[in-house]
């Protein structure tokens, strides 16, 4: 802590000389701008205030009175601040010794740790004479966030610190004891900690130190031996004062035992190891991260027969339609040729059920709602579904709740809502396996794959979700946690991987049929074959009269209806590979690695303005982004709209959902105001993609045609939408690595032109050759220039003058762009001599690679301003700008300029 205190004093503009027995620390201090001495005596020479921050009384005595001690160098009248935790008796005696030398002492022990020492936010308990406190006040204030002046003279501050350490040590020891007992009882120690933390038994030390025990992380933020010393001070002082301290004495012995075992330099939370050694039971509540390959190879061989044909046969006997209530659009990750409804009127459901489909999805987007609103929504859908089914002859259906494969969402609220309308089922089935996203359930533990490793779901970022956070990775315990104990973990049944791979569908069927009525069962799975085996067994059980309510990830749905995967869909598969408009990509926050791969498309939207600022600022931001997006899309530029990276959360889960709603609704409004029909639309994130589809694009239905990449659904919007038939890529927020989004955008991008005008000219400069620029007025002229360029194997520029554009219009530009794209040499298209703002702004959207801003008819000042304005717009579209800053007097091409020549000595560079 001494180093942090010294460097903070430097930052507070004190002149600081330091000394430490550890030489590397002195080097760091010099690098921070401090001065150093070779001994305490040299360091103390001519200083006004000496701060002593050492471990114990012996070290304090050595620093002050040892060989080359500080006392020898201190000038008369200097002040000493002793910030070490020592006994009050030692401080009182030290003050008397220092007074005899004309020195002042402030007893100022501290609390707060290394981090707060470097920040100047320590809590300091200071005592001493008024004169000493006055002389040291500026130093103490600079180091502290809370400065307590304790009356009673030197020793009073150490007395307060001693009492604080008594309580702190006892709290750590009692916390370790409680967690050890809980572990010995077989309790889930993480859930135990969470319960105590939210009850009367908690303390700051309990909440701070027990996580170290649960994580088995004993990085020494505060060493165990410190409490051996501090509680030793407590017991000695209590003995001299004849005050029996039973609890503190026992706690001291516990820390002594830990130190004797060799754990003294570890974190003080390591005192729990004493109990672990005695009982043989670990308190650690953290599941290990496993090597994926090792785990998967350790499992039994898969069931040898592919059940897909059996599933098709069984589904013919089981005429029930699978109705999937999807809490965001990403649930269609594994299906194709299936329809999605985004509204659920009785009429729409009747129409759908009359077609007797094997499956259809209803997009609820309930993950964006509060639990109360989500429950009401599910009840509304199930009520309409029940009414609709009664209007259709010979129809039966099964409801599936498609949820997040990382366990977020409204469970059990949505399941309770279904049951309240449709009645109790024989069992609830929990099945979050999703291969494409790397989600595996093995031995009841749900894992999220991270490269080659399997991370317990409860230890991932998904478990820390502001709205749907959880602690448990074991699905049995997760059910208990989410139901708040209503369904105990001990009552939850399990379909094991061994049963799937050794018993097959028949064993699954028998297990499901033998479940207790109204029970809950989790499903383990590590492969698509496992999922297919379970689905086949479940259909058998349904044919025996059993009913189930499934809350699952996407993989269950596709295997349940027997879908065979197909290759990713590309633009040519949908016949849009020749369309010229840009693609629209909308992302609600993106990680830096993803953003870097799409940096040429970025257009940021301020989260702060959308969620936290005034309505006027919000409206201005929405209009700004929509206007720019229209320009880019019309110019055949793929356009990325993303919210800025700052993460703003509320104090509660409801407040966080409200902030998310404000941001999502603003993105909806932006897309609603984009009038240009995109070549395709990609929306990243479940809530974002749902809101855009239903609210911005007004889609009431869509067809899932397949996937853009594994696990990334691709829809075609229905005829009632604003853009009928436009491909809509639903990119889940929790699928794919950092380059997956860029891979999809690249595969859906327009074929790139051979060169931009800037690249063309830079290549010419490097090669030492000229590039011909030819004005063309019709298609024949463009073809002639391209033919000549190809014959000479030379680059060229097709120039269109405003008069030619007025005559030939957009078709002329399109012909030139098409000719340039199909040429086998670099050809670019340039708008020449644009003299009016209107024609230049219009030209930005027509597909030109570059343009000339001709403001030569203006004054120099107005010309520069005019050129800068157009350049800003053009550069945002990666267009090169040529500028005409003036006219030279004389005659050229029968054009005579008689204006006076203006000599321009210097001009600002137009970037």
Image (cartoon, rainbow, N blue to C red):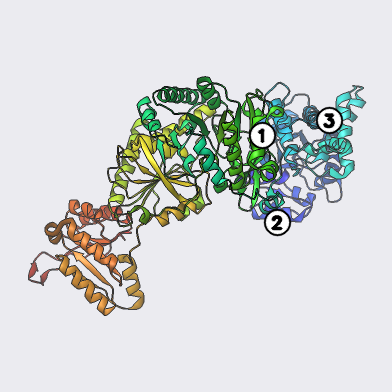
Residue behind mark 2:
27
Quarter of the image with the N terminus is top right
Instruction: Pick whichever, 867 or 640, lies toward us.
Output: 640
Q: Distance between the residues labelled 2 and 3?
A: 34 Å
**Any part of residue 869 in sight:** yes
**Any part of residue 667 in sight:** no
Mark nearer the N terminus (1 vs 2): 2
Q: Does dot 3 land on a helix, a strand or a loop? A: helix
- Name which quarter of the figure residue 339 lies in: top left
- The image position of residue 531, as x and y in percent, is 59, 43
User: What residue is at 85 percent from the left and 39 percent from the top?
Assistant: 57
Q: How far apart are marks 1 and 2 (CA)?
A: 72 Å
- Which dot, 1 or 2, sits closer to the camera? 1
Q: Does dot 2 land on a helix, a strand or a loop? A: helix
Instruction: Pick whichever, 747 or 58, lies toward us.
Output: 747
The mark tally for this picture is 3
Q: Distance between the residues labelled 1 and 3?
A: 74 Å
Q: Residue 88 carries which label?
A: 3
Instruction: Indicate left or right for 193 with 629 as reference.
Output: right
Instruction: Pick whichever, 242 or 481, lies toward us.
Output: 481
Residue behind mark 1:
510
């Amino acid at each position: 802590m001494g180093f942090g205190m010294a460097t903070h004093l430097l930052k507070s503009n004190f002149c600081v000389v330091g000394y430490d027995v550890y030489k590397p620390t002195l080097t760091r201090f010099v690098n921070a701008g401090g001065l150093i001495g070779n001994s305490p005596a040299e360091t103390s020479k001519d200083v006004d205030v000496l701060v002593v921050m050492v471990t114990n009384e012996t070290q304090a005595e050595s620093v002050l009175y040892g060989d080359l001690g500080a006392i020898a160098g201190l000038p008369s009248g200097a002040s000493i601040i002793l910030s070490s935790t020592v006994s009050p008796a030692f401080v009182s005696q030290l003050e008397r010794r220092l007074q005899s030398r004309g020195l002042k002492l402030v007893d100022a022990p501290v609390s707060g740790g290394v981090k707060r020492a470097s920040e100047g936010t320590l809590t300091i308990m200071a005592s001493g004479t008024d004169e000493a406190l006055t002389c040291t006040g500026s130093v103490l204030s600079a180091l502290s966030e809370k400065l307590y002046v304790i009356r009673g003279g030197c020793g009073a501050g150490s007395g307060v610190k001693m009492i604080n350490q008594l309580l702190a040590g006892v709290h750590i020891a009692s916390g370790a004891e409680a967690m050890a007992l809980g572990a010995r009882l077989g309790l889930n120690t993480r859930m135990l900690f969470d319960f105590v933390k939210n009850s009367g038994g908690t303390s700051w030390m309990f909440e701070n130190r027990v996580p170290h025990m649960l994580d088995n992380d004993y990085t020494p933020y505060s060493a165990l031996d410190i409490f051996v010393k501090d509680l030793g001070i407590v017991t000695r002082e209590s003995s001299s004062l004849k005050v029996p301290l039973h609890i503190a004495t026992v706690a001291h012995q516990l820390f002594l035992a830990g130190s004797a075992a060799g754990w003294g330099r570890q974190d003080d939370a390591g005192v729990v190891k004493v109990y672990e050694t005695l009982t043989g039971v670990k308190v650690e509540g953290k599941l290990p991260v496993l090597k994926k390959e090792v785990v998967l190879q350790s499992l039994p061989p898969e069931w040898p027969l592919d059940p897909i044909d059996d599933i098709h046969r069984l589904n013919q006997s089981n005429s029930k339609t699978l109705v999937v209530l999807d809490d965001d659009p990403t649930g269609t990750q594994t299906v194709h040729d299936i329809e999605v409804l985004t509204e659920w009127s009785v009429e729409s459901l009747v129409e759908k059920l009359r077609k007797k489909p094997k499956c259809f999805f209803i997009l609820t987007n309930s993950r964006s709602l509060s639990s109360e609103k989500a429950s009401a929504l599910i009840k509304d859908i199930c009520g309409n579904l029940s009414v609709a089914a009664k209007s259709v002859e010979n129809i039966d259906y099964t409801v599936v709740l498609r949820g997040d494969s990382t366990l977020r969402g409204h469970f059990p609220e949505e399941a309770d809502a279904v049951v309240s309308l449709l009645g109790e089922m024989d069992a609830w089935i929990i099945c979050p396996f999703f291969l494409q996203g790397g989600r595996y359930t093995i031995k009841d533990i749900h894992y999220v794959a991270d490269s080659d490793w399997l991370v317990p779901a409860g230890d991932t970022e998904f478990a820390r979700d502001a709205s749907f956070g959880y602690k448990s990775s074991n699905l049995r315990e997760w059910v208990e946690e989410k139901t708040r104990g209503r369904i105990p973990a001990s009552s939850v049944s399990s379909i094991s991987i061994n049963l799937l791979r050794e018993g097959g569908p028949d064993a699954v069927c028998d297990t499901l049929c033998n479940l207790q009525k109204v029970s809950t069962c989790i499903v383990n799975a590590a492969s698509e074959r496992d999922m297919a085996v379970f689905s086949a067994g479940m259909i058998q059980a349904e044919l025996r009269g059993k009913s189930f309510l499934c809350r699952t990830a996407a993989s269950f749905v596709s295997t349940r209806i027997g879908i065979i995967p197909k290759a990713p869909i590309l633009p040519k598969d949908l016949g849009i590979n020749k369309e010229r408009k840009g693609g629209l990509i909308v992302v609600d926050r993106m990680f830096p690695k993803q953003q870097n791969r799409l940096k040429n498309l970025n257009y940021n939207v301020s989260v702060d303005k959308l969620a936290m600022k005034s309505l006027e600022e919000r409206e201005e931001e929405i209009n700004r982004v929509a206007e720019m997006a229209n320009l880019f899309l019309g110019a055949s530029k793929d356009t990325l709209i993303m919210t800025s990276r700052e993460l703003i959360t509320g104090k509660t889960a409801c407040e966080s959902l409200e902030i998310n709603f404000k941001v999502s609704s603003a993105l909806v409004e932006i897309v609603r105001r984009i009038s240009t029909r995109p070549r395709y639309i990609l929306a990243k994130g479940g809530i974002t993609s749902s809101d855009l589809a239903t609210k911005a694009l007004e889609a009431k239905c869509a067809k899932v045609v397949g996937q853009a990449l594994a696990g990334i659904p691709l829809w075609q919007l229905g005829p009632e939408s604003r853009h009928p038939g436009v491909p809509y890529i639903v990119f889940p927020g929790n699928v794919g690595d950092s380059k997956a989004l860029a891979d999809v955008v690249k595969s859906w991008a327009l074929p790139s032109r051979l060169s931009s005008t800037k690249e063309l000219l830079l290549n010419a400069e490097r090669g030492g050759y000229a590039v011909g620029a030819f004005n063309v007025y019709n298609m024949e002229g463009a073809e002639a220039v391209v033919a000549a360029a190809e014959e000479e194997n030379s680059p060229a520029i097709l120039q269109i003058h405003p008069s030619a554009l007025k005559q030939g219009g957009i078709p002329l530009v399109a012909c030139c762009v098409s000719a340039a794209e199909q040429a086998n040499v670099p050809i670019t298209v340039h708008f020449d001599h644009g003299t009016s703002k209107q024609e230049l702004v219009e030209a930005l959207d027509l597909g030109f690679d570059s343009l000339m801003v001709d403001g030569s008819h203006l004054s120099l000042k107005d010309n520069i301003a005019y050129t800068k304005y157009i350049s800003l717009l053009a550069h945002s579209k990666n267009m090169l700008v040529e500028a005409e800053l003036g006219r030279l007097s004389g005659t050229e091409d029968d054009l005579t300029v008689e204006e006076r020549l203006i000599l321009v000595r210097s001009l600002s560079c137009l970037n």
